[in-house]
Amino acid sequence: MHRDSILIVDDEPGIRELVGQILQDEGYEVQTAASGEDALEAVGRDVFDLILLDLWLPGIDGIEVLKQLKASGVSTPVIVISGHASAEQAVTAIQAGAHDFLEKPLSYDRVLVSVRNTLKQFHLERRMREVLKGTEEPHLTGSSPVIEALRTQIRTAAPTGGRVLITGANGTGKEVVARMLHQASKRASGPFVAVNCAAIPSELIESELFGHLKGAFTGAVEAKRGKFELADGGTLFLDEIGDMSLLTQAKVLRVLQEQRFTRLGGSREITVDVRVVAATNKNLEEEIAAGRFRQDLYYRLNVIPLRVPTLAERREDIPALVDELMGAAVRSTGARPKHFSPAAMNTLMSYSWPGNVRELKNVIERLVIMVPDDEITAGHLSFLDTGPGSQSGLAGIDATLPLREARARFEREYIAAVLARCGGNVTRAAKELGLERSHLHRKLRQLQIDSRSADTS
């Protein structure tokens, strides 16, 4: 587990040594500084979880140090210490951003209580900021068999703590699955930290993951924690890990094996307790064969494999997704809610959705903003290529499938589309399909099409 790092700033060597020893005995990492200038240099060079700062210092005093720290954006909490305390000084220190104020001679029990409480509040506030980044509970929308199966797999895998490798095409919701794993795990109270490995330049990915000290490379103007450190006690989601360089892969492998690392430019080893969940849209076995991905890292990550289905594999979920995405689009844009005509819904059900749920979300937002009417018709969806020459709709079945499997898939998608167009009404769907109602019910069971919300009257 990561050990909190504390900087003690005091011009009295005895205070630095004694307080430092007490805090080290409590399991904290300690550095010291004898002046305000040394303190600012240390903060620029390294990252601390807490600063104990004496007010009376040679050179610039503690209040000025505190003001400079806050002005430079340093969020590290500060406990101010003074041997000549007054109410006015205490007020000045708190107004300047101090978390607590301690008087000399120090009561070391009081120091420990203040340190523990301040660190607890600091970590809680950081956790709350992470939670507020996404206030909605992560979930998978739909009741198709493939989604129900994925939910079951998530519930089974989440509490185990095992590493998970999530595969699936772009836009299917791999990060949603990662967040669900975190929320259902024993680490749910810890942080969830996501890194898109494809979006970060290769020369910066190591700094992003492991952090760096000031001056570690050109542009490193201040020390910074890495994602592994920020995810301590929680989950680190490495998205698009197939795009990570071989050099970075080797370093990630070492962290997975040892649960410790050093920041770029530093020598101090940092120990963390992190569950890694990775995701990719690539076939990593093919990447291994091509020499672009380490086989040993693959085995480390692929303890529990989960695959997120494409939207084309779960077409019966499209009406439920449309309702949810419509509500979200209305809330974010302030536009009036709209409904889809049966023909328009059929168009959505027939389209191949190469961009999956992400593409559907973009389409719904576009329609909410651009369609002036309350009803969205098939004509409003003319920008979707659903013609016979496209890879959309039921024409997009894999031509390599055996005939029996291809026929079953076609029949399943076709019946699901008609049932959705009829609003789940089995009687109406049977009439459109030219089937007896009882025959359609048998088909629904046989093809595992969910009809729990259908009209069975």
Image (cartoon, rainbow, N blue to C red):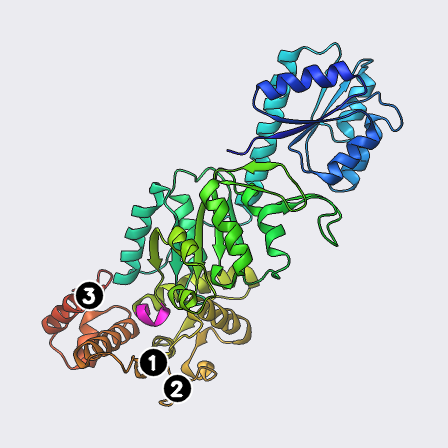
Q: Amino acid at mark 3?
A: Gln
Q: Measured from the top left, where is residue 203 in percent x and y? A: 64, 59
Q: Of tags 2 and 3, which is closer to the observer? A: 2
Disc 3 is placed on an element classified as loop
Q: Which label was assigned to residue 390? A: 2
Query: Disc 1 versus disc 2: distance between alpha carbons?
Result: 8 Å
Q: Contact, CB < 8 Å: mark 1 with mark 3?
A: no
Q: Which of 409 and 165 lies nearest the eye of the viewer?
A: 165
Q: Is residue 312 magenta?
A: yes
Q: Is residue 177 magenta?
A: no
Residue receiving disc 3: 448
Residue drawn 59% across the image and 38% down it: 126
Residue drawn 46% across the image and 81% down it: 380
Q: Which label was assigned to residue 136? A: none
Q: Amino acid at mark 1?
A: Gly
Is residue 454 found left or right of 10 in the rendered image?
A: left
Q: Measured from the top left, where is residue 376 in percent x and y? A: 44, 76
Disc 1 is placed on an element classified as helix
In the displayed structure, 353 sits above or below 60; it is below
The range drawn in magenta is: 310-315
Disc 2 is placed on an element classified as loop
Query: Local crowd at mark 3 within 10 Å, few (<14), some, or many (≥20)?
Result: few
Q: Which of 411 and 241 lies nearest the eye of the viewer?
A: 241
Q: Which label's residue is closer to the chain start, 2 or 3?
A: 2
Q: Amino acid at mark 2?
A: Ser
Q: Which label was assigned to residue 393? A: 1
Q: Is residue 55 visible?
A: yes
Is residue 269 found left or right of 442 in the rendered image?
A: right
- The picture quadrant where one finds residue 449 is bottom left
Q: Which of 81 and 412 lies nearest the eye of the viewer?
A: 81
Is residue 90 found left or right of 363 in the rendered image?
A: right
